[in-house]
Image (spheres, grey):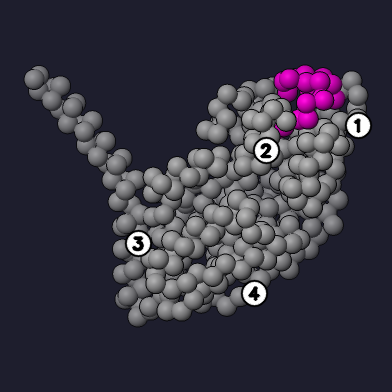
Amino acid sequence: MNPSLQCQSAALHFVALAVLARKTLLPCLLLFSASLALAQSGAAYPSRPVKFIIQYTAGGLGDTVARALAQHLSERTGQPFLIENRPGANGVIAMEALAKAPNDGYTVGMATQTGLVMNAAVRKKLPFDPIKDFTPVSLVFRSPLYLVLHPSVKANTVAELIALARREPGKLTYASIGVGSIQHLAGERFKQLAGIDLLHVPYKGSGPALTDLLAGQVSMMFEGATSGLGPVKAGKLRALASTTNTRTSASPELPTMREAGVANFDISSWFGFAVPAGTARPIVDRLNAELRLMLSSPATAQKMLAAGIDLTPSTPEEMAERIRIDLPLWAKIVRDAGIEPE
């Protein structure tokens, strides 16, 4: 073989090995480093059961992911990670409980965009500080939304929907799971960017909102893949677009809102985990490494893909930066929409 071609082949082989090592060895190296730090500090974490606070009722997507992670952590550490469902107040109840828990590593919790960012944008006062009262562990996944309509709405594209809304301002309605939810603010963002008037109809959850949407009591909704795309595949609803800036793996045939003509529309709901502020860094690193180890599993990736969500493991610093970026962004969206904080 030509020496130049041999060098190119060797270089490509080295790059492939480097990429493979980054995907498969990095979580193990992180776990080893965290375990070594704990051993050096004389800590044996965990040495007793750990409370795992979740802001959702049992059975939903967030709860399901949390339970899978809890099982993984229990198996890896030999200590039970006990799920405690604390739903209500758009996640405020659960986040307050996490913020006020001891920072000894024996209380962890799901930290979401809704719980930390959306609530800060739509409430005058919270019983916790989204930045100061928590130590991020890692982002876990993001869930795109989909614009779905009742078949009675005479629109097959986003452009047709906008034209219809302009002809009949205020007649079309959109459902959400409550004021300040990602579904609500996605609808407000759509109204702003498209220059249309839609009537917001808040519900207490996806179940009643989808029930009324399927019955034609409301016109449309921005909803996640798990509950939103099932009725679409059954022919009971019509999907027009996804809300992220790239097409989704769950429904790649659908255009994004940007592709459909609504510029600067990029919305998804992220989910992560956090511990109370001041938790020792070796504990945070151990939890982060275990989480990344689980998320790097092909079996986990396949399950998440089937649920229509994208895995997004991160460092604690990357999650903290995500929160810092999102807080002013969504505060501005709320102000521009004329939503008065409660």
Q: Which residue is mark 1?
A: 170
Task: Give the percent coordinates (x, y) of residue 110.
Answer: 59, 60
The residue type indicated by label 2 comes to Gly
Task: Give the percent coordinates (x, y) of residue 118.
Answer: 71, 52
Which one is in front in this view, the residue at disc 3 or the one at disc 2? 2
Relative to 162, does residue 278 appear above or below in the rendering?
below
Q: Residue at x 59, y 43 (%)?
A: 143
Residue 277 appears in the picture as rendered: no
Q: Is residue 154 magenta?
A: yes
Q: Which residue is mark 4?
A: 100
Relative to 19, does residue 177 appear above or below in the rendering?
below
> Callout 2: few (<14), some (14-19), or many (20+) C-alpha neighbours within 10 Å?
many
| Viewer-side residue, 314 vs 170 | 170
- Name the element at disc 2: helix
CA–CA distance in space, label 4 to label 3: 28 Å
Q: Which residue is mark 3?
A: 31
- Name the element at disc 1: loop
The residue type indicated by label 3 comes to Leu
> Callout 1: few (<14), some (14-19), or many (20+) C-alpha neighbours within 10 Å?
few
CA–CA distance in space, label 1 to label 3: 54 Å
The answer to which quarter of the image holds residue 171 is top right
Residue contact at pointers 1 and 2, CB within 8 angstroms: no
